[in-house]
Amino acid sequence: MARWLPRSTDLTRFCQKLSRVKTLEDDMMETSFNRCLSTIDLTLLGIGGMVGSGLYVLTGTVAKEIAGPAVIVSFIIAGFASLLAALCYAEFGARVPKTGSAYMFTYVSVGEIWAFLIGWNVLLEYMIGGAAVARAWSGYLDSIFNHKIKNFTETHVGAWQVPFLARYPDFLAAAILLVATAFISFGAKVSSWLNHVFSAISMGVILFILIMGFVLAQPKNWGAQEGGFAPYGLSGIMAGTATCFYAFVGFDVIAASSEEARNPQRAVPRAIAFSLGLATGAYILVSVVLTLMVPWHSLDPDSALADAFYRRGYAWAGFLVAAGSICAMNTVLLSNLFSLPRIVYAMAEDGLFFQIFSRVHPRTQVPVVGIVVFGLLMALLALVFDLEALVQFLSIGTLLAYTFVAASIIVLRFQQQKVDVPTPAAGGRPNPEPHECPSSGELKEYESFSDKLQLVDRDKSKEQREPGQLKAAFEPYLEFLSDFYPGEVVTVAVVTLMVSAICLCSILVFGNTHLHLPTWSYSLLLILFSLGFLLSLLLIWAHEQQRSTQTFQIPLVPLSPALSIVLNIYLMLKLSYMTWLRFAVWLLLGLLVYFGYGIWHSKENLRELQPQRVSARYVVFPSGSLEERVQPVQPSCQPSTGPPDTDTDDCKR
């Protein structure tokens, strides 16, 4: 019986496979894509992903049913919360200018299985999101023509009464997705140009709404006779914040496009900041004019802006608003169709998804197979499925991606940076021999055995400490932590921080409702989990992090990512149990794909199976010699195709 049980070494090796991270190329600017997108292109892509139908529908819905005129405050708080997540994406997008967005960021810092699950969830998120926007686009256009398209379809095709299927097939939604798929397949430049056209029209309509809205504004609509500015109080503002947060989820298209940016180190952070700032400003200002034009309690949630102009005697303005709404939904469609194939490409390129999706068209330089296949799948979803029940699924995938990207930022900041061995130029001075000390004050790295092995003597008296090591000021109080390898304590602290955040948010969300905790236990648990969260945060802060680089870095690490983690987990726990049930089913399907295909075809797995020449990597500090600081390593001799004396020297070294 015991012989059938897995050995501890096998379990360890299996866990190492699940947690292995992606090895990045030396030249991360090298790509099979066309680096043609400027900062303006990326900014407009981000604006197109965020300022969609939500501007024309969400503002009225939240104002009437959740927050009243205080929807303005809800958008301000939601914009700040989104900024925390956006800054994490900006740092990663600048440091790792590769397509894949949250999937790629998780893969290079946390581990393979977590990256696959993030990519798997983002994949479904984009598919449902694109199909839902296409159906909203179709419904909005149909309403302009008094639902003639719907009536014609039901009369000549028929209506269905089947669970999970739409009432009638939406041919218009499927058609617009197929047309958008065709344009996207022509290349990044064509997609960007098309997005420019629709974004320009949409922003022109928004400008018209703001000017006309302020002209027609009546401050009395915020007065006490209409219910006041915040009729639902603080709880209404926070509930509105949770809804408004999802209006800003489109900025990750910028990170997904970083491999096609000309200068991603500068363009990605700037584009994220500009697009998020403009989108937040648009949502806030439109909410101001909407609630000032007509009383908030009389708004029509389905078409608030058009109805507001109609009631003020400007029915013709409703056609402009309708045109702006359709153009805004077109930009969201393009954003979804632009991002999805690139994330699938990144997963396929790494071997975690089917290899056919990693093919790039030689002329257009886009993953045309992924664009066509997932464009067709998205059109099929929009044609026959009822997506209203699945729309909430979008939230959990996005929030999970935000959470892992924020955690990845903390882990990455406290990891040691890889130091490459410089190749001497022709005629230049070669690298110093192992017994020589570098003349500069920096560390010098040498290689002679395994590429994965680093032997560094942690001299506790040296002034300049490496990332992940305990700060000198805390060493007298936390000396027992200095025995760990740099970064290990931080990784454990990040896990503890996330567990504490989950427990803390669970008490806040379910403590008084589902758990029915008495006041004393509710307060005690809040204090305990808050202390666990704060102690984990302080423990991370007590370690050295990477020094400033030439690329953008999010400020106040680890505080900023930690706040983003708490907020994302809180919003995830506010979702319905059916959303979590569907999420669990989709995760199980993803695990079947990963263990059936991805784990075996992963490039990291193939790299481990390849026989490699063994070499040792070690570091010489300027304050001492090699013999004093490097432990001896004796590898096993392996035959080599090189000269005989090379193998002899390697084995003696």
Image (cartoon, helix red, strand yellow):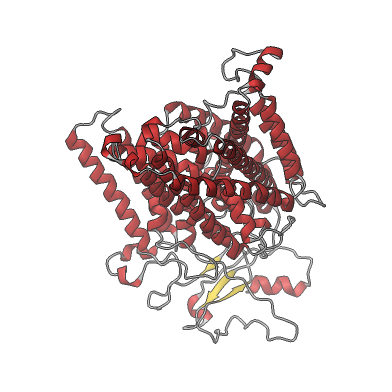
Q: Is residue 478 left or right of residue 634?
A: left
- Name the residue at 57% across, 36% down: 316
Left or right of 633 on screen, residue 430 = right
The foreground one among 177 and 408 is 177
176 lies left or right of 299: right
Residue 413 visible to an observer of this rendering? yes
Q: Residue at x 61, y 53 (%)?
A: 44
Q: Nearer the viewer, residue 396 or 234?
A: 234
279 in relation to 481, above or below: above
Image coordinates of residue 23 in percent, x first then y, are 62, 57
Q: Position of residue 9 (x, y in %)?
A: 53, 46
Q: Position of residue 354 (x, y in %)?
A: 71, 40
Q: From the image, which quarter does the C terminus lie in?
A: bottom right
Residue at left offset 72%, top offset 31%:
175
Vertical placement of residue 498 versus 510, above or below: below
Decide which of 236, 264 is in the foreground and name it.
Answer: 236
Which corner quadrant of the image does residue 128 belong to?
top right
